[in-house]
């Protein structure tokens, strides 16, 4: 009965979903593309005779990037299978194309109505499915169970905040979690919260994001940027969210002598591309000399702020930075990924909101790879102190490398779980 009521609500909300797509298309016209897929209607997918298909769902950019080591492992273990990756956002789909090209098929996962999910599974007939992180779709899970398609939740994380939300629908959450063939949780805390909601014996395997290797071309790009900048110190605000840039810029102007010869270069990389122009306007309104990465020009000595309005270059930004603040942690967004910065030895500053990466944030600080900040002024002041203390920067850099190296191996453990679940 709980899933029936849920399904009725989803169907009734479909007109709202259409309005939402039109609203998002104002800044991202890509939201107007591939609409039929969102309702369970798909084009022809070329496949060799008797070729099996593995399906992986990665809702957006972060999940798609996190899936890289897992997809490599799947290709090695199942070389005769085609791989399909599904998304919910255009940026996720574009990231898939950037990372994998045409070697992997991609489409949108439809909205979670019973009929749309049945059409999806009937059209692609996957041998098994993998859902990244925290995407729980009751009708999708039920349809997979009916068609005997093993479905697994991998790199699973569940914050206390999200767990409290699912707990408001206990029957539906329990039914959905128990319909999964296996769950590979990032941490013991994630596994415990999933188990409290009704999951059967989730396995703790670690975070696949630790297994992502920094691409050589991104490292080279970062070093090239560093050459252009010279000896000037660089502070990176990575993956910032709405409202954080204004707080950071105000604090920067209160605490930093803008225009002085030894003023650090501030680089801001917003999390979402649809906000690039808004952030550019915000910086320019502060009368700061601004450059945009998209202009593809040499970084000038007079530049106060460099706007990283590009996609897929986060490893390059972290490579050139002396200190990196991880966005989404200054305001209550739960933080973005701090692992990439630590993986290339960049010292990290984190705001008070880290629930999406709670364990990684705690351990990074315990290792000495990251420092906590209370607010925007504290962020800028700690940054300036670090930039003038080479010894502390060096220790934090080495700590970040040790931290990420220690936590590698989640992909191999996840693959062992997948193979047991599929063969069992």
Image (tube, rainbow, N blue to C red):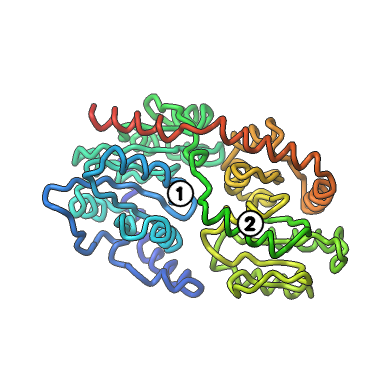
Residue 92 sits above or below residue 198 on the image: below
Is residue 107 rendered to the left or right of residue 397? Answer: left
Where 13 sits versus 416, above or below? below
Q: Give x and y (percent) for residue 43.
A: 22, 64
Residue 63, numbered label: 1
**Which of the two discs, 2 and 1, sits closer to the camera?**
2
Residue 146, percent from left and from top: 20, 40
Which residue appears farthest toward the top when viewing the image?
201
- In the image, 202 versus 395, the foreground residue is 395
Circle 2 residues within 10 Å: few <14, some 14–19, many ≥20: some
Query: x%, y% of residue 386?
Result: 80, 46
* Residue 345: quadrant of the picture: top right
Viewer-proximal residue, 236 or 112? 236
Is residue 176 shown above or below 201? below
In the image, which disc is placed on residue 223? 2
Q: Residue at x 31, y 56 (%)?
A: 103
Q: Residue at x 41, y 65 (%)?
A: 16
Front residue of 354/223: it is 223
């Amino acid at each position: 009965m709980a899933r029936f009521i849920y399904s009725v609500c989803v169907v009734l909300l479909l007109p709202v979903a259409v309005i939402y797509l039109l609203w998002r298309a104002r800044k991202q016209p890509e939201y107007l593309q591939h609409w039929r897929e969102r309702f369970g209607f798909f084009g022809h997918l070329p496949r060799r005779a008797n070729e099996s298909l593995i399906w992986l769902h990665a809702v957006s950019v972060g999940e798609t990037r996190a899936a890289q080591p897992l997809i490599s492992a799947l290709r090695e273990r199942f070389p005769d299978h085609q791989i399909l990756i599904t998304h919910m956002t255009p940026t996720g789909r574009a990231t898939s194309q950037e990372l994998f090209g045409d070697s992997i098929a991609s489409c949108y996962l439809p909205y979670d109505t019973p009929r749309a999910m049945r059409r999806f599974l009937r059209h692609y007939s996957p041998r098994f499915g993998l859902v990244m992180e925290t995407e729980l779709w009751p009708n999708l899970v039920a349809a997979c169970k009916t068609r005997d398609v093993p479905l697994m939740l991998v790199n699973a994380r569940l914050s206390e905040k999200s767990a409290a939300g699912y707990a408001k629908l206990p029957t539906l959450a329990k039914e959905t979690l128990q319909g999964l063939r296996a769950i590979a949780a990032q941490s013991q805390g994630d596994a415990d919260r999933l188990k409290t909601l009704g999951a059967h014996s989730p396995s703790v395997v670690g975070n696949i994001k630790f297994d992502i290797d920094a691409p050589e071309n991104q490292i080279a790009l970062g070093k090239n940027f560093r050459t252009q900048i010279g000896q000037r110190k660089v502070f990176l605000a990575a993956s910032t969210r709405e409202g954080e840039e204004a707080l950071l810029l105000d604090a920067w102007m209160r605490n930093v002598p803008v225009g002085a010869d030894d003023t650090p270069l501030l680089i801001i990389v917003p999390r979402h591309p649809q906000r690039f122009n808004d952030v550019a306007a915000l910086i320019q309104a502060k009368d700061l000399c601004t450059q945009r990465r998209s202009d593809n020009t040499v970084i000038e000595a007079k530049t106060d702020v460099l706007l990283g309005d590009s996609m897929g270059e986060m490893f390059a930004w972290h490579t050139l930075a002396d200190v990196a603040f991880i966005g989404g942690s200054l305001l209550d967004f739960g933080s973005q990924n701090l692992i990439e910065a630590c993986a290339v030895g960049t010292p990290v500053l984190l705001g008070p909101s880290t629930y999406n990466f709670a364990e990684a944030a705690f351990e990074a600080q315990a290792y000495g790879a990251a420092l906590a900040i209370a607010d925007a002024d504290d962020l800028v002041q700690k940054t300036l102190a670090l930039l003038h203390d080479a010894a502390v920067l060096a220790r934090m850099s080495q700590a970040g490398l040790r931290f990420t190296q220690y936590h590698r191996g989640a992909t191999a453990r996840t693959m062992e779980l997948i193979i047991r679940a599929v063969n069992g």
